[in-house]
Image: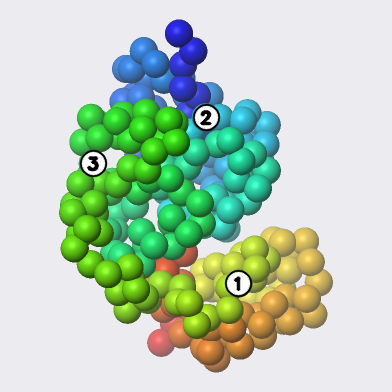
Amino acid sequence: MKRITVLLVEDHTVVRQGLRNLIELEDDFEVVGEAHTGREAVVQVKKLHPDVVLMDIAMPLLNGLEATRQMLKANPATKVLMLSAHSDDAYVKNATESGAMGFLLKQATAHDVCLAIREIHKGKKFFSPIISRRQERIHPLAHDRAGGFTEKAAPLTSREMEVLQLIAEGKANKETAAELGIGMKTVEKHREHVMQKLDIHDTAGLTRYAISAGIIESSVQLTIV
């Protein structure tokens, strides 16, 4: 029997090890790699071509949403199952729009984790039961009220998403340029475009947006006032 290959992407070591222990109890799963940042996950997908990526949304340097877009572009056959401590409609909406096939809360049972992996490997969508029940009751357009990407906003490019995350994490333009391997003027131009597209014109506003969209966790940036 060919086993389902899984890549684990989680910046908290204890959580990542717990997921590995859980998954390795199943005969039809094989953990082929681990990553602790979204950027590392993209590299691992290109190298390992896993069947399923089990990934946290909020991670340093490159969040799970943008990592999902980049890894699916590199390897469309890979299926992504997103993990989050938050069940907000905006998180779920943004995850599915990025290409994720499923969305699980971190308090999910071991049974649901394994079932979700098997289902999305078959090409089916899977959501935590509480999210599935809520999705059946609400109109899709209601998601936008929770702070997600609205239809009116021009979509951010991959590079703009990366710049937005680093700004929200408190990185200065010089640090952002070094992290992304681009020039300062390019960073400034991307920053300007992000502000124009989102109609947000200060760092505090961009940080609040990044938190509401699930790009960073609320604990990442505490110094903005």
Mark 2 burial class by Cα count in 10 Å: few <14, some 14-19, many 20+: many
* Cα distance in 3D space between marks 2 and 3: 21 Å
- Please rate how many residues cluster around mark 1, counting C-alpha atoms within 10 Å: few if below 14, some from 14 to 19, many from 20: some
Look at discs 3 and 1 and give the one toward the viewer.
1
Q: Secondary structure under badge 3? A: loop
Q: How far across and how far down the image is residue 86, in percent?
A: 29, 58
**Residue 165 against residue 29 in the figure, above or below:** below
Q: Earlier in the sequence, mark 2 or mark 1?
A: 2
Residue 79 point in image, percent of width and height = 50, 38
Coordinates of residue 60 in the picture (x, y in percent): 52, 56
Amino acid type at mark 2: Asp
Taking the spot 43% from the left edge, 45% from the top edge, the residue there is 101
Residue position marked by numbered label 1 in the rendering: 156
Residue 108 — which label? 3
Q: Nearer the viewer, residue 156 or 25?
A: 156
Mark 1 and mark 3 in contact (Cβ < 8 Å)?
Answer: no
Q: Which mark is residue 126?
A: none
CA separation in Å, label 3 and label 1 = 31 Å
**Which marked residue is nearer to the observer: mark 2 or mark 3?**
2
Callout 1, which amino acid?
Leu
The quadrant in which the N terminus is found is: top left
- Which residue is drawn at the image coordinates 31% and 29% (left, top)? 114
Q: Which residue is mark 2?
A: 51
Residue 148, position as x, y percentages in the image: 41, 72
Quadrant including the C terminus: bottom left
- Dividing the picture into quadrants, the one containing residue 174 is bottom right
